Amino acid sequence: MPLLEIERLKKTFRAPDGGTHSVVSVEKFSLEAQSQVALRGESGSGKTTFLNLIAGILKPDSGVIRIDGREMSALGEGSRDRLRATTIGYIFQTFNLLQGYTCLENVLLGMTFGHGADSEFATALLKRVGLGERLNHRPRQLSIGQQQRVAVARALANRPKIVLADEPTGNLDHNNARESLKVIREACRENGAALLLVSHDREVLSQFETVLDLEKINRAAIASFA
Amino acid sequence: MTLFRIVMKSLRQHALSTFVTAISISLAGALLMSVWSVKTQTQATFTQINGGFDAVLGARSSKLQLVLNAIFHLEASPANIAWQDYLDIQKHPMVAFAVPIAMGDNFRGYRVVGTLPEYFTKTEFANGKHYVIKSPGKNFALTNNEAVVGSFAAQKLGLKIGDRFRPYHGLNFNEQEQHEDEYTVIGILEPSNTPADRVVWIPLEGFQHMKGHSAQAAEQISAVLVKLRTPIAGGMLDNAINKNGTKLTFAWPIGATIASLLDKISWFDKVLELIAYLVALVATASILASIYNSMNERRREIAILRALGAHRLTIFSTVVLEAASIAALGMVFGYVIYFLLMTIIAQIIRAQTGVVLDPFTGNMILLWTPLGMIGLSAMAGIVPAFKAYRTDVAENLAPTS
Protein backbone atom coordinates (compact mmCIF):
# COMPACT_ATOMS: atom_id res chain seq x y z
CA MET A 1 0.00 0.00 0.00
CA PRO A 2 1.47 3.44 -0.94
CA LEU A 3 2.34 5.81 1.86
CA LEU A 4 0.40 8.63 0.21
CA GLU A 5 -2.67 8.09 -1.98
CA ILE A 6 -4.72 10.83 -3.58
CA GLU A 7 -7.92 10.31 -5.54
CA ARG A 8 -10.18 12.82 -7.31
CA LEU A 9 -8.81 15.69 -5.24
CA LYS A 10 -10.40 19.07 -5.91
CA LYS A 11 -9.81 22.48 -4.39
CA THR A 12 -11.35 25.71 -5.58
CA PHE A 13 -10.99 29.24 -4.23
CA ARG A 14 -13.40 32.12 -4.37
CA ALA A 15 -12.17 34.81 -6.72
CA PRO A 16 -12.45 38.52 -5.87
CA ASP A 17 -15.09 38.91 -8.58
CA GLY A 18 -17.31 36.46 -6.72
CA GLY A 19 -16.67 33.50 -9.03
CA THR A 20 -14.65 30.44 -8.20
CA HIS A 21 -11.56 29.02 -9.79
CA SER A 22 -10.19 25.56 -9.45
CA VAL A 23 -6.59 25.45 -8.27
CA VAL A 24 -6.14 21.73 -7.72
CA SER A 25 -7.85 18.91 -9.52
CA VAL A 26 -5.86 15.72 -9.26
CA GLU A 27 -7.41 12.49 -10.44
CA LYS A 28 -4.88 10.13 -8.93
CA PHE A 29 -1.52 10.43 -7.28
CA SER A 30 0.50 8.18 -5.01
CA LEU A 31 3.85 8.07 -3.28
CA GLU A 32 5.60 5.00 -1.91
CA ALA A 33 7.21 4.93 1.52
CA GLN A 34 10.82 6.13 1.57
CA SER A 35 10.65 7.16 -2.08
CA GLN A 36 11.83 10.52 -3.34
CA VAL A 37 9.76 12.27 -5.98
CA ALA A 38 10.04 15.71 -7.49
CA LEU A 39 7.10 17.59 -8.91
CA ARG A 40 7.79 20.11 -11.61
CA GLY A 41 5.54 23.13 -11.53
CA GLU A 42 5.71 26.74 -12.56
CA SER A 43 4.47 29.65 -10.48
CA GLY A 44 0.71 29.59 -10.12
CA SER A 45 0.46 25.91 -10.93
CA GLY A 46 -1.00 25.15 -7.49
CA LYS A 47 2.15 23.58 -6.01
CA THR A 48 1.78 25.11 -2.56
CA THR A 49 -1.96 24.46 -2.45
CA PHE A 50 -1.33 20.84 -3.40
CA LEU A 51 1.21 20.44 -0.58
CA ASN A 52 -1.01 22.28 1.89
CA LEU A 53 -3.84 19.88 1.04
CA ILE A 54 -1.58 16.88 1.63
CA ALA A 55 -0.39 18.43 4.91
CA GLY A 56 -3.97 18.97 6.04
CA ILE A 57 -3.46 22.71 6.32
CA LEU A 58 -6.20 23.11 3.72
CA LYS A 59 -9.28 20.94 3.48
CA PRO A 60 -10.19 19.77 -0.01
CA ASP A 61 -13.59 20.45 -1.55
CA SER A 62 -13.76 16.80 -2.49
CA GLY A 63 -11.59 13.76 -3.00
CA VAL A 64 -9.49 11.52 -0.81
CA ILE A 65 -6.03 12.01 0.67
CA ARG A 66 -4.79 8.95 2.50
CA ILE A 67 -1.53 9.08 4.42
CA ASP A 68 -0.12 5.99 6.06
CA GLY A 69 -3.55 4.40 5.93
CA ARG A 70 -5.39 7.33 7.49
CA GLU A 71 -7.76 9.41 5.46
CA MET A 72 -6.53 12.96 6.07
CA SER A 73 -9.32 14.48 3.99
CA ALA A 74 -12.01 12.94 6.22
CA LEU A 75 -10.50 14.09 9.50
CA GLY A 76 -11.58 17.06 11.55
CA GLU A 77 -9.19 19.95 11.92
CA GLY A 78 -7.79 18.85 15.27
CA SER A 79 -7.06 15.34 14.00
CA ARG A 80 -5.47 16.77 10.85
CA ASP A 81 -3.22 18.94 13.04
CA ARG A 82 -2.22 15.89 15.02
CA LEU A 83 -1.59 13.74 11.93
CA ARG A 84 0.47 16.54 10.37
CA ALA A 85 2.53 16.95 13.54
CA THR A 86 3.30 13.25 13.85
CA THR A 87 3.54 12.06 10.26
CA ILE A 88 4.50 14.98 8.04
CA GLY A 89 7.55 17.23 7.93
CA TYR A 90 7.23 20.45 5.96
CA ILE A 91 10.07 22.50 4.51
CA PHE A 92 8.91 25.91 3.33
CA GLN A 93 10.50 28.01 0.62
CA THR A 94 11.01 30.84 3.10
CA PHE A 95 11.93 28.35 5.86
CA ASN A 96 9.42 29.88 8.32
CA LEU A 97 11.74 29.73 11.28
CA LEU A 98 10.63 31.61 14.37
CA GLN A 99 13.04 34.50 14.80
CA GLY A 100 12.77 34.70 18.57
CA TYR A 101 13.89 31.11 19.01
CA THR A 102 17.35 29.57 18.73
CA CYS A 103 18.10 26.83 16.20
CA LEU A 104 17.64 24.18 18.85
CA GLU A 105 14.41 25.75 20.10
CA ASN A 106 13.03 25.92 16.57
CA VAL A 107 13.61 22.19 16.19
CA LEU A 108 12.23 21.46 19.67
CA LEU A 109 9.17 23.54 18.87
CA GLY A 110 8.53 21.27 15.89
CA MET A 111 8.58 18.33 18.28
CA THR A 112 6.29 19.95 20.88
CA PHE A 113 3.15 19.33 18.86
CA GLY A 114 4.24 15.90 17.69
CA HIS A 115 5.79 13.17 19.81
CA GLY A 116 7.19 15.58 22.38
CA ALA A 117 10.45 17.49 22.74
CA ASP A 118 13.59 15.36 22.60
CA SER A 119 16.58 17.59 23.08
CA GLU A 120 19.08 14.84 22.32
CA PHE A 121 17.51 13.97 18.97
CA ALA A 122 17.06 17.65 18.06
CA THR A 123 20.75 18.24 18.75
CA ALA A 124 21.69 15.18 16.71
CA LEU A 125 19.62 16.42 13.77
CA LEU A 126 21.22 19.86 13.87
CA LYS A 127 24.64 18.24 14.03
CA ARG A 128 23.69 16.06 11.08
CA VAL A 129 22.89 19.12 8.96
CA GLY A 130 26.17 20.73 10.00
CA LEU A 131 24.89 23.12 12.66
CA GLY A 132 26.34 21.47 15.74
CA GLU A 133 28.18 24.68 16.55
CA ARG A 134 25.14 26.88 15.99
CA LEU A 135 22.62 25.33 18.37
CA ASN A 136 22.01 28.51 20.31
CA HIS A 137 22.17 30.92 17.40
CA ARG A 138 19.05 32.68 16.32
CA PRO A 139 17.98 32.48 12.67
CA ARG A 140 19.08 36.04 11.91
CA GLN A 141 22.58 35.12 13.06
CA LEU A 142 22.78 32.43 10.39
CA SER A 143 23.33 32.51 6.64
CA ILE A 144 20.38 31.74 4.38
CA GLY A 145 21.80 28.29 3.68
CA GLN A 146 22.17 27.57 7.39
CA GLN A 147 18.61 28.72 8.04
CA GLN A 148 17.46 26.31 5.41
CA ARG A 149 19.27 23.49 7.17
CA VAL A 150 17.54 24.36 10.46
CA ALA A 151 14.25 24.05 8.57
CA VAL A 152 15.34 20.61 7.34
CA ALA A 153 16.20 19.50 10.86
CA ARG A 154 12.85 20.80 12.11
CA ALA A 155 10.98 18.97 9.35
CA LEU A 156 12.59 15.71 10.44
CA ALA A 157 12.20 16.35 14.17
CA ASN A 158 9.07 14.22 14.62
CA ARG A 159 10.49 11.32 12.62
CA PRO A 160 7.89 11.91 9.89
CA LYS A 161 6.98 9.32 7.28
CA ILE A 162 6.83 11.95 4.60
CA VAL A 163 8.60 15.26 4.09
CA LEU A 164 6.98 17.89 1.90
CA ALA A 165 9.38 20.45 0.48
CA ASP A 166 8.01 23.55 -1.24
CA GLU A 167 10.69 25.12 -3.45
CA PRO A 168 13.23 24.47 -0.69
CA THR A 169 16.10 25.90 -2.69
CA GLY A 170 14.17 28.82 -4.14
CA ASN A 171 15.93 31.35 -1.96
CA LEU A 172 19.42 29.89 -2.22
CA ASP A 173 22.27 30.56 -4.59
CA HIS A 174 23.48 27.82 -6.90
CA ASN A 175 26.08 26.27 -4.59
CA ASN A 176 23.92 26.47 -1.49
CA ALA A 177 20.98 25.01 -3.39
CA ARG A 178 23.00 22.00 -4.53
CA GLU A 179 24.42 21.44 -1.04
CA SER A 180 21.07 21.95 0.62
CA LEU A 181 19.27 19.55 -1.67
CA LYS A 182 21.91 16.93 -0.92
CA VAL A 183 21.34 17.41 2.82
CA ILE A 184 17.56 17.16 2.45
CA ARG A 185 17.70 13.99 0.39
CA GLU A 186 20.29 12.30 2.58
CA ALA A 187 18.58 13.28 5.82
CA CYS A 188 15.23 11.98 4.58
CA ARG A 189 16.85 8.73 3.45
CA GLU A 190 18.64 8.28 6.78
CA ASN A 191 15.43 8.91 8.71
CA GLY A 192 13.31 6.65 6.55
CA ALA A 193 11.08 9.49 5.34
CA ALA A 194 9.65 9.75 1.85
CA LEU A 195 10.28 13.07 0.11
CA LEU A 196 7.86 14.96 -2.09
CA LEU A 197 9.56 18.06 -3.41
CA VAL A 198 8.03 20.66 -5.70
CA SER A 199 10.22 23.01 -7.69
CA HIS A 200 10.45 24.74 -10.99
CA ASP A 201 14.28 24.71 -10.92
CA ARG A 202 15.66 22.42 -13.63
CA GLU A 203 18.94 21.99 -11.76
CA VAL A 204 17.06 20.73 -8.71
CA LEU A 205 14.74 18.51 -10.69
CA SER A 206 17.66 16.94 -12.53
CA GLN A 207 18.89 15.46 -9.25
CA PHE A 208 15.80 13.24 -8.92
CA GLU A 209 15.23 9.87 -10.53
CA THR A 210 11.47 10.41 -10.53
CA VAL A 211 10.17 13.75 -11.73
CA LEU A 212 6.47 14.26 -12.36
CA ASP A 213 4.87 17.17 -14.09
CA LEU A 214 2.35 18.80 -11.77
CA GLU A 215 0.65 20.50 -14.65
CA LYS A 216 -0.20 17.12 -16.16
CA ILE A 217 -1.39 15.73 -12.85
CA ASN A 218 -3.34 18.85 -12.15
CA ARG A 219 -5.24 19.03 -15.44
CA ALA A 220 -8.44 20.69 -14.36
CA ALA A 221 -6.57 23.40 -12.52
CA ILE A 222 -4.60 24.31 -15.60
CA ALA A 223 -7.80 24.37 -17.54
CA SER A 224 -9.30 26.74 -15.06
CA PHE A 225 -6.41 29.17 -15.47
CA ALA A 226 -6.65 29.04 -19.25
CA MET B 1 9.13 23.11 24.78
CA THR B 2 5.98 23.59 26.83
CA LEU B 3 3.11 25.99 26.29
CA PHE B 4 4.43 28.04 29.18
CA ARG B 5 7.84 28.40 27.52
CA ILE B 6 6.19 29.50 24.29
CA VAL B 7 4.34 32.14 26.28
CA MET B 8 7.52 33.27 28.03
CA LYS B 9 9.24 33.58 24.65
CA SER B 10 6.41 35.71 23.36
CA LEU B 11 6.52 37.95 26.44
CA ARG B 12 10.27 38.45 25.95
CA GLN B 13 9.80 39.19 22.28
CA HIS B 14 7.30 41.90 23.19
CA ALA B 15 9.24 43.03 26.24
CA LEU B 16 8.31 46.71 26.13
CA SER B 17 4.56 46.25 25.86
CA THR B 18 4.77 43.41 28.40
CA PHE B 19 6.58 45.71 30.83
CA VAL B 20 4.20 48.65 30.35
CA THR B 21 1.05 46.56 30.71
CA ALA B 22 2.51 44.65 33.67
CA ILE B 23 3.26 47.95 35.41
CA SER B 24 -0.28 49.20 34.84
CA ILE B 25 -1.57 45.93 36.32
CA SER B 26 0.79 46.26 39.28
CA LEU B 27 -0.40 49.80 40.02
CA ALA B 28 -4.03 48.77 39.76
CA GLY B 29 -3.48 45.70 41.95
CA ALA B 30 -1.49 47.65 44.54
CA LEU B 31 -4.15 50.36 44.64
CA LEU B 32 -6.94 47.82 45.11
CA MET B 33 -5.09 45.95 47.85
CA SER B 34 -4.10 49.18 49.61
CA VAL B 35 -7.60 50.65 49.59
CA TRP B 36 -9.05 47.42 50.95
CA SER B 37 -6.33 46.91 53.52
CA VAL B 38 -6.49 50.48 54.82
CA LYS B 39 -10.26 50.25 55.00
CA THR B 40 -10.43 46.89 56.78
CA GLN B 41 -7.46 47.50 59.05
CA THR B 42 -8.67 50.98 59.96
CA GLN B 43 -12.10 49.63 60.85
CA ALA B 44 -10.66 46.67 62.75
CA THR B 45 -7.99 48.66 64.58
CA PHE B 46 -9.75 51.93 65.37
CA THR B 47 -12.93 50.31 66.64
CA GLN B 48 -10.89 48.13 68.97
CA ILE B 49 -8.87 50.96 70.45
CA ASN B 50 -10.41 52.17 73.66
CA GLY B 51 -7.31 52.74 75.78
CA GLY B 52 -8.54 50.00 78.09
CA PHE B 53 -11.71 51.87 79.05
CA ASP B 54 -15.39 51.39 78.32
CA ALA B 55 -16.52 55.01 78.31
CA VAL B 56 -15.51 58.64 78.53
CA LEU B 57 -17.24 61.15 80.76
CA GLY B 58 -16.92 64.76 79.71
CA ALA B 59 -18.68 68.07 79.28
CA ARG B 60 -21.94 68.18 77.35
CA SER B 61 -20.97 67.62 73.72
CA SER B 62 -20.99 64.92 71.08
CA LYS B 63 -19.82 61.46 72.08
CA LEU B 64 -17.54 61.41 69.08
CA GLN B 65 -15.78 64.61 70.11
CA LEU B 66 -15.23 63.23 73.59
CA VAL B 67 -13.81 59.94 72.34
CA LEU B 68 -11.57 61.58 69.76
CA ASN B 69 -10.27 63.99 72.36
CA ALA B 70 -9.83 61.71 75.36
CA ILE B 71 -8.91 58.41 73.69
CA PHE B 72 -7.30 59.39 70.38
CA HIS B 73 -5.96 62.80 71.48
CA LEU B 74 -7.13 64.30 68.21
CA GLU B 75 -10.08 66.60 68.77
CA ALA B 76 -10.21 69.67 71.02
CA SER B 77 -11.80 69.29 74.44
CA PRO B 78 -15.41 70.58 74.39
CA ALA B 79 -15.12 72.10 77.89
CA ASN B 80 -13.88 71.15 81.32
CA ILE B 81 -15.79 69.34 84.01
CA ALA B 82 -15.58 69.72 87.77
CA TRP B 83 -13.30 67.59 89.92
CA GLN B 84 -16.42 66.59 91.81
CA ASP B 85 -17.80 64.92 88.67
CA TYR B 86 -14.77 62.67 88.72
CA LEU B 87 -15.26 61.85 92.36
CA ASP B 88 -18.93 61.06 91.74
CA ILE B 89 -18.35 58.66 88.87
CA GLN B 90 -15.40 57.07 90.63
CA LYS B 91 -17.59 56.22 93.59
CA HIS B 92 -20.38 54.86 91.44
CA PRO B 93 -20.91 51.20 92.34
CA MET B 94 -20.89 50.10 88.72
CA VAL B 95 -17.58 51.75 87.95
CA ALA B 96 -14.53 49.58 88.43
CA PHE B 97 -11.93 52.20 87.74
CA ALA B 98 -11.89 55.84 86.64
CA VAL B 99 -8.98 58.06 85.68
CA PRO B 100 -9.22 61.82 85.23
CA ILE B 101 -7.29 63.51 82.43
CA ALA B 102 -6.57 67.16 81.80
CA MET B 103 -5.32 68.58 78.56
CA GLY B 104 -4.83 71.81 76.72
CA ASP B 105 -1.04 72.05 76.54
CA ASN B 106 1.56 70.70 74.17
CA PHE B 107 5.26 70.27 73.81
CA ARG B 108 6.32 71.13 70.28
CA GLY B 109 3.02 69.89 68.86
CA TYR B 110 2.73 66.74 70.99
CA ARG B 111 -0.04 66.83 73.57
CA VAL B 112 0.82 67.22 77.22
CA VAL B 113 -1.82 65.36 79.24
CA GLY B 114 -2.18 65.41 83.00
CA THR B 115 -3.35 62.23 84.72
CA LEU B 116 -2.83 60.07 87.79
CA PRO B 117 0.10 57.64 88.17
CA GLU B 118 -2.48 54.82 88.30
CA TYR B 119 -3.14 55.35 84.62
CA PHE B 120 0.06 53.41 83.89
CA THR B 121 -0.29 50.81 86.62
CA LYS B 122 -3.96 49.89 86.45
CA THR B 123 -4.89 50.35 82.80
CA GLU B 124 -5.08 47.26 80.64
CA PHE B 125 -5.04 48.98 77.23
CA ALA B 126 -5.58 45.70 75.37
CA ASN B 127 -6.22 42.12 76.46
CA GLY B 128 -3.53 41.34 79.05
CA LYS B 129 -1.43 44.32 78.03
CA HIS B 130 -0.38 47.05 80.42
CA TYR B 131 1.74 50.13 79.80
CA VAL B 132 5.39 49.42 80.49
CA ILE B 133 7.91 52.09 81.38
CA LYS B 134 11.29 51.30 79.89
CA SER B 135 14.05 50.52 82.35
CA PRO B 136 15.63 52.42 84.08
CA GLY B 137 12.69 54.83 83.94
CA LYS B 138 9.91 55.03 86.50
CA ASN B 139 6.41 56.36 86.94
CA PHE B 140 5.90 59.97 87.98
CA ALA B 141 4.75 60.99 91.45
CA LEU B 142 1.52 62.98 91.67
CA THR B 143 3.11 66.06 93.16
CA ASN B 144 6.40 66.23 91.28
CA ASN B 145 7.21 68.06 88.06
CA GLU B 146 7.98 64.81 86.30
CA ALA B 147 6.94 63.34 82.96
CA VAL B 148 6.49 59.95 81.34
CA VAL B 149 6.71 60.23 77.57
CA GLY B 150 5.01 58.01 74.99
CA SER B 151 7.46 56.08 72.80
CA PHE B 152 6.59 57.82 69.51
CA ALA B 153 6.59 61.29 71.08
CA ALA B 154 9.94 60.58 72.79
CA GLN B 155 11.44 59.44 69.51
CA LYS B 156 10.15 62.42 67.57
CA LEU B 157 10.95 65.00 70.26
CA GLY B 158 14.32 63.42 71.03
CA LEU B 159 13.45 63.23 74.71
CA LYS B 160 15.30 60.85 77.02
CA ILE B 161 15.42 60.25 80.72
CA GLY B 162 16.79 63.23 82.58
CA ASP B 163 15.82 65.76 79.90
CA ARG B 164 13.98 68.85 81.07
CA PHE B 165 11.31 70.65 79.12
CA ARG B 166 8.73 73.43 79.49
CA PRO B 167 5.27 72.78 77.97
CA TYR B 168 3.55 75.29 75.70
CA HIS B 169 0.02 76.48 76.25
CA GLY B 170 -2.70 75.31 73.89
CA LEU B 171 -3.03 72.22 71.73
CA ASN B 172 -1.11 73.80 68.85
CA PHE B 173 2.55 74.66 69.16
CA ASN B 174 3.20 78.39 69.56
CA GLU B 175 6.66 79.40 70.68
CA GLN B 176 5.35 82.55 72.35
CA GLU B 177 3.19 80.61 74.78
CA GLN B 178 5.68 78.59 76.76
CA HIS B 179 4.90 77.86 80.41
CA GLU B 180 7.42 78.64 83.11
CA ASP B 181 7.10 75.26 84.81
CA GLU B 182 9.83 72.83 83.98
CA TYR B 183 9.35 69.07 83.87
CA THR B 184 11.92 66.29 83.99
CA VAL B 185 11.53 63.16 81.92
CA ILE B 186 11.77 60.21 84.27
CA GLY B 187 10.21 57.50 82.13
CA ILE B 188 9.69 56.52 78.48
CA LEU B 189 6.86 54.12 77.60
CA GLU B 190 7.46 50.96 75.64
CA PRO B 191 5.55 51.19 72.32
CA SER B 192 1.90 50.23 72.85
CA ASN B 193 0.77 51.03 69.30
CA THR B 194 -2.02 53.13 70.76
CA PRO B 195 -2.61 56.89 70.80
CA ALA B 196 -0.86 56.99 74.22
CA ASP B 197 2.45 56.67 72.34
CA ARG B 198 2.04 60.23 71.04
CA VAL B 199 1.46 61.87 74.39
CA VAL B 200 3.71 63.55 76.97
CA TRP B 201 2.20 62.51 80.29
CA ILE B 202 2.57 64.62 83.41
CA PRO B 203 0.95 64.46 86.89
CA LEU B 204 -2.57 65.82 86.99
CA GLU B 205 -1.78 68.20 89.86
CA GLY B 206 1.12 69.64 87.97
CA PHE B 207 -1.13 70.31 85.04
CA GLN B 208 -3.88 71.84 87.16
CA HIS B 209 -1.54 74.15 89.00
CA MET B 210 0.75 75.06 86.13
CA LYS B 211 1.62 78.74 86.06
CA GLY B 212 -0.37 80.42 83.34
CA HIS B 213 -3.45 78.26 83.82
CA SER B 214 -6.50 79.90 85.35
CA ALA B 215 -7.32 79.41 89.00
CA GLN B 216 -10.41 77.45 87.95
CA ALA B 217 -8.19 74.87 86.27
CA ALA B 218 -7.06 73.66 89.67
CA GLU B 219 -10.56 72.31 90.30
CA GLN B 220 -11.27 71.09 86.79
CA ILE B 221 -10.38 68.27 84.46
CA SER B 222 -11.02 67.66 80.78
CA ALA B 223 -12.58 64.20 80.97
CA VAL B 224 -12.74 60.98 82.93
CA LEU B 225 -11.83 57.61 81.43
CA VAL B 226 -14.19 55.01 82.86
CA LYS B 227 -13.85 51.24 83.22
CA LEU B 228 -17.17 49.59 84.08
CA ARG B 229 -17.76 46.53 86.21
CA THR B 230 -20.26 45.01 83.74
CA PRO B 231 -21.33 45.92 80.21
CA ILE B 232 -24.93 46.45 81.42
CA ALA B 233 -23.73 49.34 83.55
CA GLY B 234 -22.98 51.31 80.40
CA GLY B 235 -26.63 51.41 79.40
CA MET B 236 -27.71 52.47 82.85
CA LEU B 237 -25.14 55.27 83.07
CA ASP B 238 -26.00 56.30 79.51
CA ASN B 239 -29.61 56.72 80.62
CA ALA B 240 -28.76 58.51 83.82
CA ILE B 241 -26.19 60.93 82.40
CA ASN B 242 -27.18 61.46 78.77
CA LYS B 243 -30.94 61.11 78.80
CA ASN B 244 -31.82 62.35 82.24
CA GLY B 245 -28.93 64.74 82.81
CA THR B 246 -28.04 67.99 81.06
CA LYS B 247 -24.53 68.80 82.23
CA LEU B 248 -22.38 65.88 81.15
CA THR B 249 -21.97 63.43 78.29
CA PHE B 250 -21.23 59.77 78.82
CA ALA B 251 -19.59 58.45 75.61
CA TRP B 252 -20.32 54.74 75.62
CA PRO B 253 -19.45 52.34 74.08
CA ILE B 254 -16.21 53.71 72.65
CA GLY B 255 -15.88 51.23 69.76
CA ALA B 256 -19.41 51.94 68.51
CA THR B 257 -18.75 55.68 68.64
CA ILE B 258 -15.73 55.30 66.39
CA ALA B 259 -17.61 52.87 64.15
CA SER B 260 -20.29 55.53 63.64
CA LEU B 261 -17.56 57.94 62.50
CA LEU B 262 -16.16 55.38 60.07
CA ASP B 263 -19.68 54.76 58.78
CA LYS B 264 -20.10 58.47 58.13
CA ILE B 265 -16.93 58.62 56.06
CA SER B 266 -17.47 55.27 54.33
CA TRP B 267 -18.47 57.12 51.16
CA PHE B 268 -14.82 58.09 50.85
CA ASP B 269 -13.80 54.42 50.90
CA LYS B 270 -16.39 53.72 48.24
CA VAL B 271 -15.01 56.48 46.02
CA LEU B 272 -11.49 55.10 46.45
CA GLU B 273 -12.75 51.59 45.72
CA LEU B 274 -14.50 52.80 42.59
CA ILE B 275 -11.31 54.52 41.41
CA ALA B 276 -9.33 51.35 42.10
CA TYR B 277 -11.83 49.24 40.14
CA LEU B 278 -11.68 51.68 37.24
CA VAL B 279 -7.89 51.58 37.24
CA ALA B 280 -8.06 47.77 37.27
CA LEU B 281 -10.46 47.85 34.34
CA VAL B 282 -8.23 50.21 32.36
CA ALA B 283 -5.18 48.07 33.14
CA THR B 284 -6.82 44.89 31.89
CA ALA B 285 -8.12 46.75 28.85
CA SER B 286 -4.53 47.77 28.14
CA ILE B 287 -3.58 44.08 28.08
CA LEU B 288 -6.37 43.44 25.62
CA ALA B 289 -5.28 46.34 23.39
CA SER B 290 -1.60 45.50 23.60
CA ILE B 291 -2.00 41.84 22.65
CA TYR B 292 -4.73 42.54 20.12
CA ASN B 293 -2.56 45.12 18.35
CA SER B 294 0.35 42.72 18.21
CA MET B 295 -1.80 40.08 16.53
CA ASN B 296 -1.23 41.46 13.02
CA GLU B 297 2.53 41.13 13.30
CA ARG B 298 2.14 37.72 14.92
CA ARG B 299 -0.13 36.20 12.29
CA ARG B 300 2.75 34.55 10.49
CA GLU B 301 4.18 33.20 13.73
CA ILE B 302 0.80 31.73 14.59
CA ALA B 303 0.51 30.25 11.11
CA ILE B 304 3.95 28.63 11.51
CA LEU B 305 2.95 27.13 14.85
CA ARG B 306 -0.24 25.83 13.27
CA ALA B 307 1.70 24.41 10.32
CA LEU B 308 3.93 22.60 12.80
CA GLY B 309 0.84 20.92 14.18
CA ALA B 310 -0.38 23.27 16.90
CA HIS B 311 -4.15 23.00 17.33
CA ARG B 312 -6.31 26.13 17.18
CA LEU B 313 -7.16 25.67 20.84
CA THR B 314 -3.46 25.50 21.67
CA ILE B 315 -2.96 28.88 20.01
CA PHE B 316 -6.04 30.23 21.78
CA SER B 317 -4.75 28.97 25.14
CA THR B 318 -1.32 30.44 24.47
CA VAL B 319 -2.74 33.93 24.03
CA VAL B 320 -5.01 33.64 27.08
CA LEU B 321 -2.09 32.31 29.12
CA GLU B 322 0.04 35.19 27.86
CA ALA B 323 -2.54 37.71 29.10
CA ALA B 324 -2.75 35.93 32.45
CA SER B 325 1.05 35.80 32.69
CA ILE B 326 1.33 39.56 32.16
CA ALA B 327 -1.12 40.02 35.02
CA ALA B 328 0.78 37.54 37.20
CA LEU B 329 4.03 39.33 36.47
CA GLY B 330 2.33 42.65 37.19
CA MET B 331 1.03 41.40 40.51
CA VAL B 332 4.55 40.44 41.61
CA PHE B 333 5.46 44.12 41.20
CA GLY B 334 2.04 44.92 42.64
CA TYR B 335 2.96 43.28 45.95
CA VAL B 336 6.15 45.33 46.11
CA ILE B 337 4.25 48.56 45.41
CA TYR B 338 1.56 47.54 47.89
CA PHE B 339 4.04 46.99 50.71
CA LEU B 340 5.80 50.26 49.96
CA LEU B 341 2.51 52.14 49.77
CA MET B 342 1.15 50.55 52.94
CA THR B 343 4.37 51.22 54.82
CA ILE B 344 4.08 54.92 53.94
CA ILE B 345 0.34 55.03 54.78
CA ALA B 346 0.95 53.18 58.06
CA GLN B 347 3.67 55.67 58.99
CA ILE B 348 1.38 58.62 58.26
CA ILE B 349 -1.45 57.08 60.31
CA ARG B 350 0.95 56.29 63.13
CA ALA B 351 2.29 59.84 63.12
CA GLN B 352 -1.22 61.30 63.16
CA THR B 353 -2.94 58.93 65.58
CA GLY B 354 -0.35 56.67 67.19
CA VAL B 355 -2.23 53.67 65.80
CA VAL B 356 -0.11 51.18 63.93
CA LEU B 357 -1.46 49.37 60.87
CA ASP B 358 0.38 46.27 59.77
CA PRO B 359 0.70 45.99 55.96
CA PHE B 360 1.95 42.44 56.35
CA THR B 361 -1.12 41.24 58.21
CA GLY B 362 -2.67 38.28 56.42
CA ASN B 363 -5.69 39.54 54.57
CA MET B 364 -7.75 37.60 52.06
CA ILE B 365 -7.68 40.62 49.75
CA LEU B 366 -3.97 39.94 49.24
CA LEU B 367 -4.98 36.62 47.72
CA TRP B 368 -8.17 37.63 45.93
CA THR B 369 -6.79 40.70 44.22
CA PRO B 370 -4.02 38.87 42.32
CA LEU B 371 -6.38 36.04 41.46
CA GLY B 372 -9.01 38.55 40.34
CA MET B 373 -6.54 40.53 38.24
CA ILE B 374 -5.18 37.37 36.64
CA GLY B 375 -8.70 36.11 35.94
CA LEU B 376 -9.82 39.45 34.53
CA SER B 377 -6.71 39.67 32.36
CA ALA B 378 -7.21 36.13 31.09
CA MET B 379 -10.75 37.16 30.14
CA ALA B 380 -9.36 40.23 28.38
CA GLY B 381 -7.02 37.87 26.53
CA ILE B 382 -9.99 36.01 25.07
CA VAL B 383 -10.59 38.71 22.44
CA PRO B 384 -7.08 38.59 20.88
CA ALA B 385 -7.03 34.83 21.50
CA PHE B 386 -10.12 34.49 19.36
CA LYS B 387 -8.42 36.51 16.64
CA ALA B 388 -5.43 34.18 16.88
CA TYR B 389 -7.77 31.19 16.87
CA ARG B 390 -9.22 32.33 13.54
CA THR B 391 -5.85 32.93 11.88
CA ASP B 392 -5.82 31.29 8.48
CA VAL B 393 -2.72 29.13 8.22
CA ALA B 394 -2.32 28.91 4.46
CA GLU B 395 -2.88 32.65 3.97
CA ASN B 396 -0.38 33.69 6.59
CA LEU B 397 2.50 31.35 5.89
CA ALA B 398 5.32 32.47 3.66
CA PRO B 399 4.37 33.90 0.28
CA THR B 400 3.13 31.13 -1.93
CA SER B 401 5.39 29.88 -4.68
Image (cartoon, coloured by chain):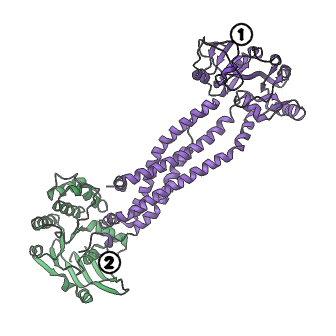
Chain colours: A green, B purple
Residue B211 visible, this angle = yes
Residue drawn 51% across the image and 50% down it: B371
Question: Where does the image place residue B389, in percent across and percent down from the top left?
Answer: 40, 67
Dot 2 crowding, Cα within 10 Å, few <14, some 14–19, many 20+: many
**Position of B153 relative to A90 (above/below):** above
Q: Along the line of sight, which residue is nearer the eye, B39 or B108?
A: B108
Q: The numbered mark 2 sits on a residue in which chain? A: A
Residues tagged 2 and 1 counted as in contact (Cβ below 8 A): no
Q: Tell me the SS state at disc 1.
A: loop
In the image: residue A39, left or right of residue B399: left
Q: The numbered mark 1 sits on a residue in which chain? A: B
* Amino acid type, callout 2: Ser
Q: Nearer the viewer, mark 2 or mark 1?
A: 1
* Amino acid type, callout 1: Asn
Quadrant of the rendered image containing residue B70: top right
Residue, disc 1: B144
Residue, disc 2: A73
